[in-house]
Image (spheres, coloured by chain):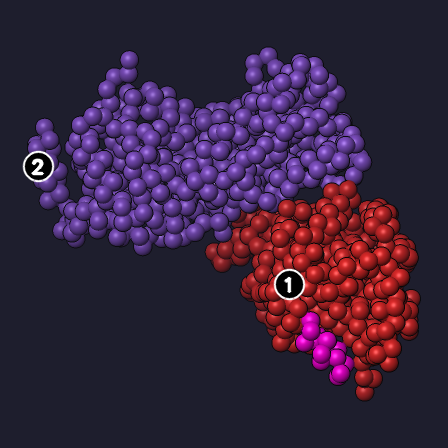
Chain colours: A purple, B red
Amino acid sequence: MIKSSTLLAGASALLFSTAAFANSHDPAAIQTKALQDSLAYEITEGLTTEVGPRQAGTEAEARARDWSVAKLKSLGFQNVRNEPFMMPTWVRGAETAEVTGPYPQKMHVTALGNSASTGAAGIEAEVAYFDSLAAMQAVPDGSLAGKIAFVTHDMHRTQDGSSYGAYGPVRWIGPSVASKKGAVAYVIKSIGTDHHRNPHTGNMNFAEGVKPIPAGALSLPDADNLERMIKLGKPVTLKLVMTPQNIGQQESGNVIAEVTGSDSSKGMILIACHLDSWDLAPGAFDDAAGCGIVTAAAKHIMDHGQPLRTIRILWAGAEEVGLWGGKAYAKAHTGSNHAIAMESDFGADSVWRVEFNLPDGAENIEKQIAQALLPLGVSANGPPATGGADVRDIIASNNLAVIDLQQDGTRYFDLHHTPDDTLDKIDPKQMRQNVAAWSTVLSIIANSDADFTMPAKE
Amino acid sequence: MIKSSTLLAGASALLFSTAAFANSHDPAAIQTKALQDSLAYEITEGLTTEVGPRQAGTEAEARARDWSVAKLKSLGFQNVRNEPFMMPTWVRGAETAEVTGPYPQKMHVTALGNSASTGAAGIEAEVAYFDSLAAMQAVPDGSLAGKIAFVTHDMHRTQDGSSYGAYGPVRWIGPSVASKKGAVAYVIKSIGTDHHRNPHTGNMNFAEGVKPIPAGALSLPDADNLERMIKLGKPVTLKLVMTPQNIGQQESGNVIAEVTGSDSSKGMILIACHLDSWDLAPGAFDDAAGCGIVTAAAKHIMDHGQPLRTIRILWAGAEEVGLWGGKAYAKAHTGSNHAIAMESDFGADSVWRVEFNLPDGAENIEKQIAQALLPLGVSANGPPATGGADVRDIIASNNLAVIDLQQDGTRYFDLHHTPDDTLDKIDPKQMRQNVAAWSTVLSIIANSDADFTMPAKE
């Protein structure tokens, strides 16, 4: 089967111009070309400049989809389309915070996704401070009645971003815990690693049966300041005004484009990013860059001639607010013929490690990829690949093989979900390294007739 | 005269405990001690935490004065007092900006000091873009009728801060030029060098006879985004809402404290900073740090025993909004016996150069200071010292000698006048180096009976 496929790919190649096939999808040649890439930056620049912030379910995300469909068509991709879906939508209102005593001063706050509203008049209450989520969890239910609970944390920068998993629960779980303990509102030190007055928003959900309360994030310098005030020993009062609203089911959509392969019987390579961003910033790192990187890589493959397998590009909608795009994609495409899923959704700094979750028998492919990535400073030998948020559901439902190109996350949580996620944060050189790594991997896997079928799960 | 004074200082020293005089104001010993300083940071932490932003003429600056008088008294300084004065006061209102077409998105803006109001309904108009102040100056009067003028610049980081002088006119003069050309409002790329969504405010004044118009600063990433939009070729419209107000004459004040010298006939050493900050931030770099540094240095001198000359500490009010504190000080103290003026108002990063403007005959003092500062990484051989903003008027009116300890300004304009000017920006180690440099200089000049009288100006 391997041989006949190889012959078929060879025959197919003959149908194309020699110019287009001059490099015959040679990974090294494609890598060299991709290191000169300008398309990834161009897409990121276009989305951040011509569209800007594009929160899921809003008219801004709809404008982003229109922009994206037009852009992907203009680049020559096939089967470009929008696959719409509906999702519940929460939108930000006014948001202010100020210490009212004993050291009155304004603070920078932003509401967390799905926060309740304080009402326009706001909530003023004494702050109950905890230096960790565990410390708040340890107090009795009802003991925070009438208080604004305030939780800090000790998150530091990590290359692999693992500190987000360690401290993220302060945002994800904290609001429910605070509500259960009786707090009238909840504020956190932003889940981030920067030193700027730009709070980090992000999604959270109240646990079933828990009363939603207003929940916001202070910028890190403000949280540190509030902590210092509290440590001076006098009761500190905070006034919060946050007036977000739930506006019900709204339309989002997944934008899809393809480089069709020469053999439609071969499972396709799904490469994903997400199109939506939080409302606070144009979302350059999160995740216009990812869309730029995967699309530029697919374009480099396309420009070298038709690959064996179809490469499907997914610019998912509504990732930030609940992974609705990934769920909708899995619902629509479970059972269709995918081989491998990949995603870029961690900024635009250099890829430093490749991770695999491929079936037994694909060791040669792993070795070939690892070898081909060495000139880019990318090493193998990491943990098994798990895939990004927008391909998680299709990986699960279709039991797919996965390859992860891990990006350097050292400064990712300086910017994540803040107003500061702007185009100037993109380092074009590191972005080109990403495109080269992706192009290299795609040139190998999209032209491989290896069997990527994963063993059935027990 | 030199000899008799030396004897007098020696005699005076004998009146104090041996412990206090163990080091006899030895500059090297004081420097070593000052490198362990914690007071400068403590003052900066106190002002930023317990007071916060303290705009001149507001109740916040009044709270800052109360805090300062109490603090300076508690440290054991003498003649601690507030010298009140009145000054015109402008306060910020609401401020929002959004591109309304063709690429709708919100931008971060802040009003410049003395900006007119757009009214609550705001002003929406097409943007007229200029890549420099000179380019706007070159168009005919009246040619910007109905437009919002927008000027960018190419400011980069400089160690000596000289790029502020080069690009500052975009803020200082630009509003008047835009008004004269007929613009309905004026926005600039913030005069700064950072990459954050925190615009830089700052003072400006409309030239006589020029109609005040709303004038604001966009954050640097927003200004870059607006510039990219304009370069796409379509007319870009911006909506600005900024509602500042003039609230008339309000009280500010200069907080003063002294280490009284043993010989009141000797001119005193005036060391200054400013207590007020802009309203957007707690003003750690600008200029709580300066107050911390000069005060800690004076305390180290005091702790080593009474110096020959009085050291007067001036925490000036109302610097940011028009140098009113420096003017009031000069008005009140012209003719009183000062010898040398110094100021710290450029953050808290290391001192890298000492500059002098001393009379002929003080060469030995210059040499002694230059030599004593070498272990701190401070070199001499700069241009003549000119003094800081709060001592400029007393230098002029009393024809004073000046010494400047130049701080590294490389990152100063990342923070200057932004919400980001917070305590976490202080590097305690560099701050201690500042205190050591100031203590070293004070130990020499406050105990010197050299004649610092400047030659009369022609």
The image's mark for residue A7 is: 2
Instruction: Kindly state the secondary structure of the residue where label 2 is placed.
Output: helix
Front residue of A72/B37: it is B37
At label 2, the amino acid type is Leu
Please state, as top left, top right, bottom left or bottom right, where the N terminus of chain A lies in the image. top left
Labels 2 and 1 positioned on one and the same chain = no
Q: Residue at x 76, y 81 (%)?
A: B359
Picture coordinates of residue B258, whole percent (x, y): 86, 59
Quarter-of-image position of residue A228: top right
Q: Residue furthest bottom?
A: B458
Residue A169 percent across, percent down from the top left: 54, 26
Q: Which is more toward the observer, A223 or B103?
A: A223
What x and y, as percent, mark residue A46?
A: 44, 48
Residue drawn at x 69%, y 40% is: A225
Residue nearer the viewer, B255 or B270: B270
Crowd band around label 2 with a 10 angstrom C-alpha radius: few (<14), some (14–19), many (20+): few
Chain letter of mark 1 equals B
Q: Residue at x 67, y 50 (%)?
A: B421
Magenta-drawn stretch contains B361: yes
